[in-house]
Image: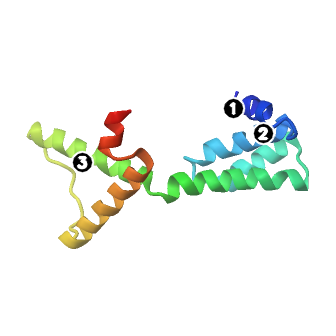
Amino acid sequence: FAAVISHQLYPDIPLGLFLGCFMAGLPAAICPMPFTLSGLSIYIFYFGLYQTVPIFISAIVSYTLVVGTGLFGAMQRRGQAADRNINNNNNETAPIEPIIDNERKKEKEIEDNFAFEQYMGTKRLQSAL
């Protein structure tokens, strides 16, 4: 669907190339295997040398944007913190964490919040939407 819309916006670029880029780029955003997904798309559609470059670029860029920003790590830590709060409220034992000094823990929290806010926006902007 996205390939057809992109082809309608840019009719000079073949539909198959858009399809190959989306086929590699979208799953590469969450799976740590951009080269494998690029190769799969290239071999399924039998692309030549010049058509492989946009496919590799779409896979690498989508992987770098989503995984490189630390968004998934921040979301995972927030989910674990919510689970710990639920466990503490139910008087169950929370999972044991490695001991980290307070300074490093604060730095990591600031980094995670920054990455998450850059992607999702601040709470003030989220409430406006």
Q: Is residue 101 visible?
A: no
User: Looking at the picture, how far across and down is residue 47, in whole percent?
Assistant: 88, 47
- Disc 3 is placed on an element classified as helix
Which of 4 and 90 lies nearest the eye of the viewer?
4
Q: Residue at 87% across / 38% down in the picture?
A: 14
Q: Earlier in the sequence, mark 1 or mark 3?
A: 1
- Which amino acid does the dot numbered 1 rest on? Ala
Residue 81: numbered disc: 3
Colour treatment of the image = rainbow
Label 1, label 3: how far apart the Cα atoms are: 36 Å
Q: Residue at 89% across / 55% down in the picture?
A: 50
Q: Which residue is mark 1?
A: 2
- Disc 2 is placed on an element classified as helix
Which quadrant of the figure contains the N terminus? top right
User: Looking at the picture, how far across and down is residue 73, in whole percent?
Assistant: 40, 54
- Which amino acid does the dot numbered 3 rest on? Ala
Residue 18: numbered disc: 2
